[in-house]
Image (tube, coloured by chain):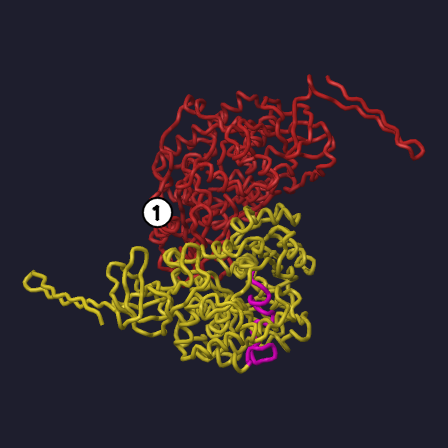
Chain colours: A yellow, B red
Amino acid sequence: MEVYVDGVGMVPFGKHPQLSLVSLMAQAARGALEASKGPEVEALFVGAMNPEEFTGEGNLASALADELGLAGLPSMRIETASSTGAAVLEAAFYAVASGAYTSVLAVAGEKMTHQSTPRVTRILAEVIEPYEKNAGASMVALAAMVTQAYAHKWGLSQKRLERVLCRVALKNHRNGALNPYAQFRKEITEDQYFNSRMISYPLRLYDCAPITDGAAALVLTREKRDVKITGVGHGTDTLAVRHRIHLHSFAACRAAAERAYAMAKRGPRDVDLAEVHDAFTCFEIIGAEDLGLLEEGKGWRAVEKGRTEIQGEIPINPSGGLKARGHPVGASGLAQAVEIVWQLRGEVDQARQVKGARVGLLHSIGGLANNNLVVILEREDAPAHALPWEPVFSKPVEIERHHRPDPRRVSKEGVLDSYTVLYVPPEGFPSPLVLGMITTYSGQRILARAATPTTFRVGERVAIEKGDDAFYFMRFGLGQRLTFRITRKVKGWKLGLKRKFRL
Amino acid sequence: MEVYVDGVGMVPFGKHPQLSLVSLMAQAARGALEASKGPEVEALFVGAMNPEEFTGEGNLASALADELGLAGLPSMRIETASSTGAAVLEAAFYAVASGAYTSVLAVAGEKMTHQSTPRVTRILAEVIEPYEKNAGASMVALAAMVTQAYAHKWGLSQKRLERVLCRVALKNHRNGALNPYAQFRKEITEDQYFNSRMISYPLRLYDCAPITDGAAALVLTREKRDVKITGVGHGTDTLAVRHRIHLHSFAACRAAAERAYAMAKRGPRDVDLAEVHDAFTCFEIIGAEDLGLLEEGKGWRAVEKGRTEIQGEIPINPSGGLKARGHPVGASGLAQAVEIVWQLRGEVDQARQVKGARVGLLHSIGGLANNNLVVILEREDAPAHALPWEPVFSKPVEIERHHRPDPRRVSKEGVLDSYTVLYVPPEGFPSPLVLGMITTYSGQRILARAATPTTFRVGERVAIEKGDDAFYFMRFGLGQRLTFRITRKVKGWKLGLKRKFRL
């Protein structure tokens, strides 16, 4: 059964101190309902990531139905961490496609700006796997390590990496300046970017999406409209980042993309514009590669060449993205959908309009890429995919799991897969905090802290020591104490030779 | 498209201090997966009401997929307060019915016993409408007022009401004693019931479902099995209890029941057993009436006559219900479904087995009955409903909204619609705290505190005074200061006569 988009609505993103979360969401919902031509909605699908802790508002699904004067209708809350908005769209899509309803309302929102930054960081950190969180990793620290791993994998120098990230930030601010719904409606300069505070090397303040209040809403219907949802893909990954084989791209995004393309019978070449989850600038490049929109390992070159600008070959985040539109965590996925619908309907200002956009794609990341969605929306008059349809990736995406470490058997040396210098560590940790992902010679991946706050090279050999609270790593070299141990079993006896010395 | 139930699983409800919420849910899920004959599941639907605040576990949908070794699969969390488990079933049902998946896993759980009772009460109270919460109302206080309104509406004396509630508690404990998955596996006596602590008059400790850890899981599939889901109904109501026209029954439960019956083309007479949301004993009676299983206003008589016992005409809560099986808030709705599937498959002990059960119904309440679900499950060989099918209620259920009060215009007298004496009030309130629902003579319903902790009669005339923090009410009579005021407008002049006196 085909599922169409009727009206859409959104509140301008930013600070809304005077409104409760429910009022904010109701405002977006009323916009969508008023813009709808179809029959009255029969059910509500409501998303917020953590209203209980951000605003103390529980029972959100009922509260919103009541606020809208729709008490009586079925109403259900959906949550998948920071991809919640996209998951609301997915749940609403199934409900309409199942034939249970003719029209339903999908609404998502979050209210965060009234909380202090440390508290927001703490609430957001609940999505991180407990061991990694307790080791001092915050979302930005993990994102920084993914960024470093990307640069190492594809041979970008640190300087070039920084310039590429800057390009993404500048583009999204430029696009955001054209978007009346964006939190930041100002362009930024290279100087501003490079002078902005380093949060977690190599990510600066301008590499990170801001703290935002916002809400977005769509009405989905079985009745024919000009825009339809043709593909919905969803994929998860290991909760712990260190359990993943690859750190430089997101397997779950690939799985989600593959599923969405297969359902829509589309491929990356059909996509006219994409809203990509740029909670951190590098995620936009990795995301575009995971989606097959940019060539693997060459996404950064495409950015350098301006191919992702509004007037480029594959416009990414014409809205300004999470970076400039803002990132009310539960709302972002649905705000991406609203932007795409506006673009497909030609309802945005000329400067922001992607010319001839007929197929749009949204990509939303939940947590540190453990719960990701891809949704394809298209105009009724979009040309069909040149058949036969083929999977985007040459082999099916599989989530492989890194060997889980047995802490008692971690060897004393390893290779540094990635690292970051975190300048705004969680409460109780020293600043700067240097965190590294290390593949040990015993074949396990661990997250460790540097014994001293020095810099490292990704790919270098490091020594590992087990402390009381965490693993510590240090540069392998002068001053390094080494233990050599030879053991042999002879007729049931274990003979050992052990020697410690300094290099 | 038909949706069938494959394997089901559950962990024994009770205290599980050694397990995290995710481990608890994984255990139930593994049970369901192992019991399934069908193809591998393709997606997860996960429910918990408030894991962030109960256990600090965020990103639950991804965490569970990872824990089960199913990282990669789509996974989405659902929440509708205390009916979350049933809403998970609903979302999973749509996903299968839409054709998107062949088999999916529905899992719901909650972990609460490691928290102190005051903290659990505080977390649960987040689902209450803010004004009512701030006035001192907790879930049990609101439930007690609903109970009083029910007794007043149908002419039960206080003594008879207490005896009826006791019968419900005794029955559910008796059933729970037969259920190896129940938290309380002991019968209780009338003496124990009447000697148990009064929590909020007329509700005693044994009228309230306990604090519980637990999880339940079902696999839904498109492939033919012996049990199918034929009806899913969902309805919401005003967040504030005082905004409802009727306090003695739940319009949203009726709306949900009507929808489920209509989808299944069933009526109450087809139902062989029901799992009814007895978070408070009286809710079982009101629920059975809302479902049309017992005659309106005569549910209490049916309880007196033992018609809801396992061997009665319409067995209710053969599992022991929330009362004895326990109430891990997010899990209960799905645990009800598991019990029904076991009953329909004849997989429970003989003493608990409802003979010839072929159609089962579950009824789950979210919040103070603002987000309710009804699901009908039946065996493939269940006889069809005698056609033609007719709606259960003579007129369509409408959620009417009580006139919202303008606090400046609340008149000084009213009728007491219901009241309770709360002996375990929220922090910062005196004990006992007497709360009343009053319809003022100006036609508004307010929630007020008694000026002094005395007892009242429901239906009596009370005086109202506005204090700084709340409305206060008192018995109308001796000691009551009255104000008589006569005003006339004469040629633009306003003439007044005012006299205060004591009765």
Residue at the extreme right of the image, as rendered = B491
Q: Quadrant of residue A358?
A: bottom right
User: Which residue appears at 27% of the width and 63% of the height?
Assistant: A465
Q: Position of residue A497 (x, y in %)?
A: 12, 66
Query: Is residue A323 in the magenta section?
Result: yes
Q: Is residue A277 visible?
A: no
Residue wearing tag 1: B19
Chain of the residue under the numbered disc 1 shown in the image: B
User: Along the horizontal axis of the image, is A185 left or right of B216?
Assistant: right
Mostly what secondary structure, the magenta segment?
loop
Q: Identify the amino acid type marked 1.
A: Leu
Residue placed most toward the observer, A9 or B392: A9
User: Along the horizontal axis of the image, is B85 left or right of A408?
Assistant: right
Vertical side of A428 occupied by A452: above or below: below
Chain part drawn in magenta = A306-327
Vertical side of A177 occupied by B364: above or below: above
User: Along the horizontal axis of the image, is A145 left or right of B426?
Assistant: left
Mark 1 element type:
loop
Vertical side of B186 occupied by A345: above or below: below
Q: Position of residue A182 (x, y in %)?
A: 62, 65
Residue placed most toward the observer, B238 or A325: A325
Vertical side of A40 occupied by A303: above or below: below
Q: Position of residue B29 (x, y in %)?
A: 38, 51
Q: Is residue A338 visible?
A: yes
Badge 1: how crowded within 10 Å, few (<14), some, or many (20+)?
few
**Quadrant assignment for the C terminus of chain B:** top right
Q: Quadrant of residue A248?
A: bottom left
